[in-house]
Image (spheres, grey):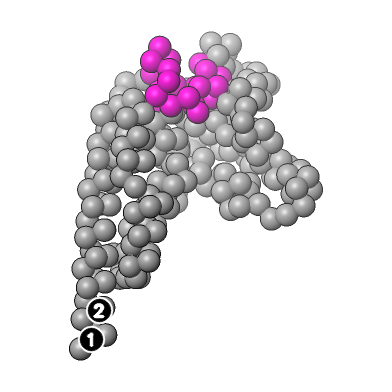
Amino acid sequence: MILLVNKTQRKALEYLFLQLRRDEAAQKKKIGETLKPRNTARGRFNHTLRVLENVRMIMKEVSCDKEVVEMAAILHDIAKLSNDRQHGKKGAEIASLYLERQGFSQKFIEKVAECIRLHSQKGETPKASIEAKILQDADLLEHHIILEIHQLIKEAAFGNLLSQHTLKQYKELYPQHFVKKCAAKGNFPIVREKFEKLILEIDRTIIHMKEQGKEKKKESYG
């Protein structure tokens, strides 16, 4: 993934990665085992880049303070590896201190902090700023199960998911109602439309997998 960032954003990304690396090391020492890829510094950093890409996509359709949204996207998960349950609140505090040291105005810092503090409360903050709602939607599109669904769809397109067992597992683990629930949390039409398209892709994938399974049976009997 190649994203163009300005000097200020690059500096924030570097700060983010250093924080994530430190927190990853602390977590490994604490639990004494390998972390899941998405809970590593690299995994969380890549997630951040995708969220940044998503906010830029949404901002093409929605008027807002772009500098606030992009900075919030960069720093939104800065506390994720150290304090998962309260990472929105803690992340807002860490981000505020960082931005203050960088000389940003108090108004800018408050706007970014609001976005970070509320980014996990998807579909629950009707009075939040437009900027906070954009970050919520951008992060919603990056839910790890949504990413896994996309990966399964890609594999199915290449004929790699053919067994009835896999088909059953796919339908049980990644049901349409989960995607519909995500869609209902979306603040903007462009995001809800993306989830609607994903539901259609799930439908097509299940049909494809069923057809492939029938073909396999015919070949085995043939």
Q: For residue 20, which numbered disc appears in the image?
A: none
Image side of residue 105 versus residue 199, left or right:
right
Q: For residue 217, which numbered disc appears in the image?
A: 2
Q: Looking at the picture, how far across and down is residue 81, in whole percent?
A: 65, 39
Q: Please tell me which residue is depicted at 32% across the width and 21% down the height of the picture.
A: 63
Q: Give the range drawn in magenta.
A: 111-134
Residue type at mark 1? Answer: Tyr
- Is residue 2 located in the magenta-colored stretch of the structure? no
Q: Is the Cβ of the residue at disc 1 closer than 8 Å to that at disc 2?
A: yes
Q: Looking at the picture, how far across and down is residue 96, in whole percent?
A: 63, 20
Q: Which of 60 and 139 is in front in this view?
A: 139
Q: Please tell me which residue is depicted at 37% across the width and 66% down the height of the picture.
A: 165
Q: Looking at the picture, how far across and down is residue 139, in whole percent?
A: 45, 35
Residue type at mark 2? Answer: Lys
Q: Please tell me which residue is depicted at 43% across the width and 26% down the height of the picture.
A: 122
Q: For residue 221, which numbered disc appears in the image?
A: 1
Q: Which of 37 and 131 is in front in this view?
A: 37
Q: Looking at the picture, how far across and down is residue 21, in whole percent?
A: 69, 45
Spatial distance from mark 1 to mark 2, Cα to Cα?
A: 6 Å
Label 1 Cα crowd, 10 Å radius (few <14 / some 14-19 / many 20+): few
Quadrant occupied by the C terminus = bottom left
Residue 126 visible in the picture: yes
User: Which type of secondary structure does the marked residue at label 1 adopt?
Assistant: helix
Residue 7 sits in quarter:
top right
Residue 78 visible in the picture: no
- Is residue 130 located in the magenta-colored stretch of the structure? yes
Q: Nearer the viewer, residue 155 or 112?
A: 155
Q: Residue furthest bottom?
A: 222
Position of 112 relative to 43 (above/below): above
Q: Which residue lies furthest to the front in this view?
A: 221
Q: Please tell me which residue is depicted at 50% across the width and 35% down the height of the picture.
A: 6
Residue 187 sits in quarter:
top left
